Amino acid sequence: MDVNNAFLQGTLEEEVYMMQPPGYGDPTKPNHVCKLRKAIYGLGQAPRAWYNELSAFLLDHSFVNSKVDSSLFIYSKNGKYMYFLVYVDDLIITGSDSKVVNQFIALLSHRFSGKDLGSLHYFLGVEVVPTRHGILLSQHKYIWDLLERHKMTAAKEVSTPMATGTSLTIHGGIELTNPTDFRSLIGGLQYLLITRPDIAYTVNKLSQFMHKPNDTHWTAAKRLLRYLKSTIFHGLHLRRDTTPTLHAYSDADWAGNSDDRTSTSGFIIYIGANPISWSSRKQKSIARSSTEAEYRAIATTSAEILWVQNLLQELAIHSTQPPIIHCDNIGATYVCANPVFHSRMKHIAIDYHFVRELVQTHRLQLAGSNFLFVLAFLIVSIVRHEGQLVKHVVTKVLSELKEAYLVVTDSLVGVDHSVKEILEMIGTNMDDVKIVRIHGMGGIGKTTLAKVVYNKLSRNFARCCYLDDVRENSNSKGIVYLQNRLISNLSRQAHPPVDCVDEGIRMIEERFSSLEALILLDDVDENSQLIALLGRRCCFGPGTLILITTRNEIVLHKFDVKLIYPVGEMDSKRSLQPFSKHAFGRDHPPLEKLEQSREIVKIAQGLPLVLEVMGSSLCAQKEIIWKEYQEKWKKGRIEAIQSKLMISYEALDPCQQQIFLDIACLFIGYDKNMVMYMWGDGELCPTHSLEVLQLMSLIKIEKDNKFWMHDHLKYLGRKIASQESGGRSARNKEALDVLQGKKRNEKLEALSLEFEEVLEYHFPLEGFADLRNLKLLEVDSSSPRHESVERLMTPDLSELLTLERLILDYCDELAEIDSSIGELKNLVFLSLMGCRELRHLPEELGGLPSLTVLLLDGTCVGEISGSVNLPTSLSKLSLANTAITHLPHAIGEMASLELLSLYGSLFINRLPYFIGQLQSLTKLDLSFSTITELPDSMERLENLQVLRIWQCYSSEGISAMPKLPVSLTSLAIWSESLVALPDLSNLINLKQLVLLMGGPSESEQVPMPWWLGRLYKLQVLALKIPHMTNLSPDLSALSHLKFLYLEDCESLQCIPQISSTVSELHILDCQSLTTLDISNLKNLSELYIVGTPVEDLSGRELLDNLLECKIEKIGHSGASAHSCNNLFQMVFDGL
């Protein structure tokens, strides 16, 4: 509460006169004076008069003035307590009953005009932040003001307040000519001790030189500021859940002052786990032994403890145990309890008897200490011989926090101002979830900035998670991969991996709805990524902070993010530091390079990426090279990033340039080892060239050994490639020019036509014939108008003997593959997906000894037989959505075939017997095909893991199941013609089973799947068995089961106890089921009971905690469709 015009409220008891104020004088009595009845501002008696007026009011209302602190008033009546603290006109009021407190505030406001400021958030420069466990006291804004006042905001941070081994004396160093700044700083630091016991010793030491500071003292003071900058958000967390037991740590730095050999006493006092009082002070007399110095420190600590005890008694806080002082000096501890030693301590008799009396009356205990006295050392003697011990302790603490810290580049500079702005934006009030969006162009430094903020705040969170490059990882590895990382990092325990996005969302929402965490999501570009990683409504608990970097400002609109920080270019002063780091390996350029560096930095226009590339280009270069670079950069277009980066490209030799262009145009995201074959047999020296490209910050090879390149560099490379000819790779415009005969490039090894926009280029395919060194050819016409191919047949390919990858996807008019393809003996990969006019394959295809992948999806190829023999080297053969009528006998000879897909093939009815010869086959997909018969040889597929048999809507489906191989881990069957329950008892490795059957023609019972209990690894179980009356009682023994789906089990009357591990239960259209027990499903998060007349549902108390719940006796198309879609995703994801 703040009182308006407080000093005007006081009534004067003394006679005080003042001259008539100007403008208000009495012209008839010009020599008279005014007698004051009330105090006014500027009057020496005003503060005391205001205090007397306020205290009289409080005493009249049953408050009692504290005897140990005159600014504290205490109210105690009928078990109700109020505490009233006064500092001039700022008042703090708290109590045990909010109603009583509010009534008194209203009474106080009526007597004194004031403003109720609500809950305590800021008082005398100390920020008070309520937390779930207590309050946090912080002075971070005050620290930042000190740093700004003394121009230390950009200073390098240090980890200790003083350097180990430092000994400050009055005589060393050069005396400061103007000590004002030093004295002002030390005065400011004194007030900071309210919340920072860790700097008490250092401030006390520096305060001893206020009368005559020198440059060493000033250096030590600035180091302290650097330490405060690194710990700006440190403060005191006072917890409510602590015992009211007093204990203290006492220590002394014996004869530590080299000027007069006095000692320094230090102590810190705790109530439970909360530090409440501390001090570091120079002793007034010289101690003749360490025991004497320690004993004096104990006496000082004892006096402070007595004061605290008296205060606690007034506050009605009582402890049944006497306070304990921990001391590391055995001699001092013995003196307190052993009267024999008193003769040796006559010269400190007062302190001796004072402490002994407290010990003998059991009002105080002395205890030896080992590890715990380090706490006192941090205050008393962090800069003396205990440096190694402190270092050990710090190492141990950091080892406990190892998960939270993110590694940031060694060349990090220039982000302090932005970090401060973000931290101020976040604030310290964390009553709710906060999301911060950090956005800007690529290469502007968003990720680095976010990492620094993350590191600053991570110490305040028990759970932290950093997900790097969300955009790239979600595209390359899938969003489920990121969900698993998030769940693993935050839960800190083993968990079953999620297999689909919806499952991940449910797990995140279920596990973390009350968790307080720090999360950093880097490079998000879609809202769907946020929903998958944060839940549909950002499900984390109060106090959670989420940092998100993105290039797209539209991202996060759905989450209504209010904390937005745009990252802009660095100014010229800050830009000089990162440039210097890369060019010279130091924060600032040497004096002889200063002006030249400033000129170069101006050209970069504050883009961190450009500064990094420029500095790397000039590192360790001679003066003449510097001048050449500077002249080139001055001539470039300043506003164009590519023009700046182009200079670095020109610094590469021709081999390095070619590899740079190859990566920019074709190989970003490719595994390095897969691409090296293109460069290894030439004179490009790829190993050295890649090293140079990395050193110049033009590329990166990531942990998964894949190439990464910044977007601006990628655009630069593709622009160069489109303007130059004669390179080893070409794409789009240049590639078209080559094919149309406008350009010749016999050295071309990789050619890509990716029609990202609608193009109207026409080219004769004979243009391919001139590319004699081509190893990779990709033509993807999935987006354009398909007039781009004029001819219906590929040209003569016999000249492309080096070709290894041929991709001709979605060439709609392509009707025939020239027989010359048989000459491509090095061809490894052939894709003809979407070539709808292609009906036949050339017989020469069988003569390709290296071919391992053949993709014919969406073609009209109807027959592979007769003279057409497929290569036996194939490992992947996809005939999805083709017109294939039967498989050739030669397929049985493909010993290396691992994947065979007949998905959507509507003209094939049976799988041949020789399919059992495919000993390497791991995945077989017959989904939505018209196959109705499987051979008995299926059991011989000893490595088969995934089998999909999903009937086509126009087909009857299979009617019988042969015995399947024991190696299967995933089996999905849907066939209305399958009425006899198959025997799957041997499939003990199954993790996913989907069995959707039809019903018999007559209403006869179907035996229950008795073998379910043997499939102990099952995680997903979906059944549709219309005339099954009971499920196996072994259902409860499936200890890994997560998802249970029952549909159209019309005769099912009872479900035995379900495994407690099930988290999703779907029961659709089971019309005979009236009872269900879910009381043991403690992990249940999703329940669907639709079209099922369940009357007796045991465990209804669980329904309130479910993420999704639908219970409808009458079938509902929307709920059923949602449930079916979930099942469909589980079946087909990942094949």
Image: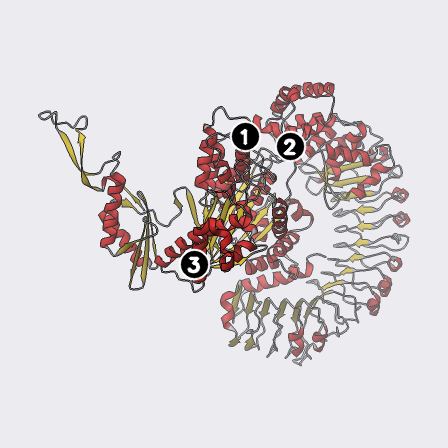
Sequence order check: which comes first, mark 1 or mark 3?
Answer: 1
**Residue 297 image position (x, y, % from top left):** 49, 49
Report the side of 1087 relative to 586 (left or right).
left
For marks 2 and 3, the one nearer the N-term is: 3
- Colour scheme of the picture: secondary structure
Q: Which residue is mark 1?
A: 171
**Disc 2 or 1, which lies upstream in sequence?**
1
Residue reaching furthest to the front: 343
Marks 3 and 2: in contact by CB < 8 Å? Answer: no
Residues at marks 1 and 3 touching, judged by CB atoms closer than 8 Å: no
Amino acid type, mark 1? His
Q: Is residue 601 above or below residue 365?
A: above
Q: Is residue 317 left or right of residue 1063?
A: left
* Of labels 2 and 3, the one closer to you: 3
Q: Is residue 634 left or right of residue 968?
A: left
Q: Amino acid at mark 2?
A: Leu
Residue holding disc 2:
609
Query: Residue sitting at 75 percent across and 33 percent down?
Result: 693
How crowded pointer 3 is (Cα within 10 Å; few <14, some 14-19, many 20+) is rated as some
Decide: is 621 above or below 1108.
Answer: above
